[in-house]
Structure formats: structure tokens, C-alpha cells
Amino acid sequence: MALAPVGLAVILAVTCALPAGCAGFPMPGMGGPPKAEAGEPEAPPPATAAPAEAAAPPAVATAPDPVDEAEALIARDQVDAAMALLKRTLDDGSARAEDALYWIAVLSFGPPISDPEQGRAALARLLAEYPHGARRHAAAAMKALVEEDDRLATDNAALKGDLQKLLNIDVEAQRQRRGTTAAPAPAPPPTAAEPAAP
């Protein structure tokens, strides 16, 4: 069913309640946009603001993180260079001092560094200065293992001392059973290079 021109105008008028929404659309019975007179230049369409492109922030060259560098050196078995870098990181007050202390402790207990006292000091400092840090659990576990190793070494030394005492008692008991006293061990015979004593 075809709509009468007036009915179409009513529908368009209701649909295009805002004049800007129907700009440039001629409605029957209503004047369209004003036309330029002959010889008069047409007005340019209103400029629409182009969306502002987000300017990318300029790339800022940042210095590589010293702990990341140290970890890369460790991966390449350059332990001495990594240790030197980690110690410098601690001296200059780097924000990643907790990680530096952790790696100093780890590297100190094994070759080629083999400095257990340095490792114990790094662990103690890490746990004292960063009690809620990300490395606290690993540091606490390492400290427990080091303490257990120390305890076992002490027990081992005590057992060796006890064993030596038992051996001395056994030797003395055998001598007493034979009725002999301890005799000094004979001197070794002179070698060809050494002349015999007169």
C-alpha cells in the first residue's frame, strides 16, 4: 500500500525529530536546505572533528636490570662475573636488593665461590630485611638446610673424635694384655740418596 506524500512527511517528521538527523533529506511540502544562487559558491560542509590519535609516548631507553643481567650470566656459567654484579647492585641500593641477596646466598654455597660464611650472612640479611618478601620461603628453606648441614658436620666431628678415643683405648688394652709397653716406631732405613749416620 502506497503512502500519500503527506503521510510520508509526517512519518519522516516524527522520525527525524532533530533537524540535524535529517539534514540534506528533502521532505515533501518542506523546503530543503538552502541552495546557493547561480554563480555563488556553495558553502563547504561543516567540518567534522577528526578523532585525535593517541600519540605514542616516546620510547625511553632504560638501563637493563642488573639482577636480570646477573641471572643471564649465571645461565652462561659466568658465576664470578654474576657475583661481582650482584654485590655492586647491593652497594648502589638497587630496588631489587632482595633478589640480589638471594642469588648471592645461592652462589656462595657452591663452587666456584664456596664461601659459606658469605652465604649465611646474605640469608640472614635477606630474612631480616625482607620478612614478607617474595624470596622469604626459599631463603628460610635454604637456611634450614644450611643449619642441618652445620649440625651434621658437628656431629660427624664429634663421632670422629669418639672413634679415635676408642681406637686409642683398644690399642692400649692390647698392649696391656701382651704385657708390653709402647715402643717407639723404628726409624726408616736410609735411602741411597742419604748417607747413613756414623
Image: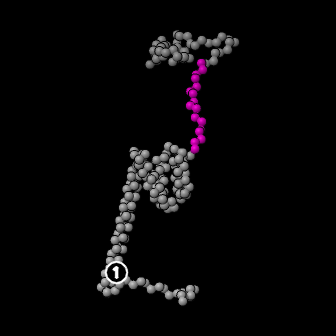
**Between residues 187 and 85, which one lies in front from this camera angle?**
187
Q: Secondary structure at mark 1?
A: helix
Asked if 98 appears above or below 115 in the picture, the reply is above
Look at the magenta stretch and give its main secondary structure: loop
Q: Residues within 10 Å of mark 1 (few under 14, many from 20)?
A: few
Q: Position of residue 82 (x, y in %)?
A: 54, 54
Residue at x 56% of width, y 87% of height:
195
- Place of residue 42 in the rendered image (x, y in percent of width and height, measured from the top left): 65, 15
| Quadrant of the frame with the C terminus | bottom right
9 within the magenta span: no
- Per the rendered image, the range of residues in magenta is 46-63
| Left or right of residue 189, residue 37 in this image | right
Q: Position of residue 29 (x, y in %)?
A: 52, 10
**Residue 34 figure quarter:** top right
Q: Is residue 115 visible?
A: yes
Task: Note whether residue 3 is visible.
Answer: no
In the rendered image, the quadrant that contains the N terminus is top left
Work out whether residue 157 or residue 23 is closer to the camera in this orientation and state it.
Answer: 157
Callout 1 amino acid: Val
Question: Compared with residue 149, is residue 72 higher up or lower down, i.e. above or below?
Answer: above
Residue at image coords 57%, 86% = 193
What residue appears at the point 39 percent right and 50 percent down from the top-left corner? Answer: 137
Residue 35 x, y percent position in the rendering? 62, 12
User: What is the quadrant of residue 145 in the picture?
Assistant: bottom left
In this orientation, which residue lies closer to the viewer: 105 or 63?
105
Q: Is residue 52 magenta?
A: yes
Q: Which residue is mark 1?
A: 171
Q: Residue at x 47, y 15 (%)?
A: 17
